[in-house]
Image (cartoon, rainbow, N blue to C red):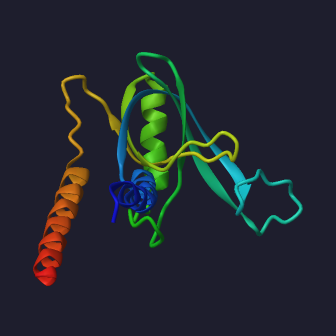
Amino acid sequence: MSIRILAVVAFVILAPLGAFLHYVLPRHDVVRIVNTEVRRVDFSGKPVDGSNPAANRDVYFIYAEDIETRKPHVYRNEDTRWGFPFYFKFNSADVQAVASSIGGEKGVALITKYGWRFDIFSWFPNAVSVRRWDPADTVIPWFNIVFFTALALLAVLIGRRLRRARG
C-alpha cells in the first residue's frame, strides 16, 4: 500500500476519533466569573414560550471572561446523570451555587468542562466542576494523562499482536 493511501486512511480514521476525544475529555479554564443565570428551556434548548409548560427544564448558565484577554466564555451547567459522556454529574445546583459565590466576589475560578462552543447552534460547553482558583495552584490533567497513556499502551499491544500474526 502506498504511503499516501495509508496517510489518507489514517487521517479518515484518526480525525473523527480526535474530534470525539476533544469533545468528551475534560479541559480546564481559568476565568473570572461575571454572572450566573437560570433559564427555562424546552428539550431542544430553545427558551420556553409558555405553550407547553410540561416539556421544559431549567438550565444553569455561567458567564465568565478570560482573566488576561477578557474574552467571554459561556458555560452550560447541566447534570449528565447516567447519560453519555459518563461524568455521572448530579450536582449542577451545587456547582451553580459555587459559581454564584465566586462571581459575587468577582473572583477567579477553575472551571472543568467538556464540549464545544458553537455560536451558530447555541451550543455551550458543560461545566463539570467549578472551584476557586489560587494563582499558586497548578492544573495537571491527570485523567487525560492516564487515559492517553492507557490508549498508547493498547495501541502498542495491538501493534505487537498484528506483527506476530503476520509472521
Q: Residue 35's x, y, as percent?
A: 56, 30
107 left or right, relative to 116: left
Q: Vertical placement of 86 versus 143: above or below? A: below
Q: Quadrant of residue 11?
A: bottom left
> Which residue occupies the foreground of this view, 79 or 44?
44
In the image, what residue occupies the spot 49% across and 36% down? 100
In the image, what residue occupies the spot 45% across and 73% down? 82
> Which residue occupies the foreground of this view, 141 or 157?
157
Q: Residue 103's x, y, as percent?
A: 48, 29
Q: Vertical placement of 138 versus 126: above or below? A: above
Among all residues in the image, which is located at the extreme front? 2
75 left or right, relative to 129: right
Q: Quadrant of residue 151?
A: bottom left
> Which residue occupies the foreground of this view, 97 or 85?
85
> Which residue occupies the foreground of this view, 88 or 73?
73
Among all residues in the image, which is located at the extreme right? 51
In the image, what residue occupies the spot 70% across and 42% down? 120
136 left or right, relative to 116: left
In the image, what residue occupies the spot 85% across and 66% down? 52
Name the quadrant of the N terminus.
Answer: bottom left
Q: Quadrant of residue 72?
A: top right
Q: Vertical placement of 2 versus 157: above or below? A: above
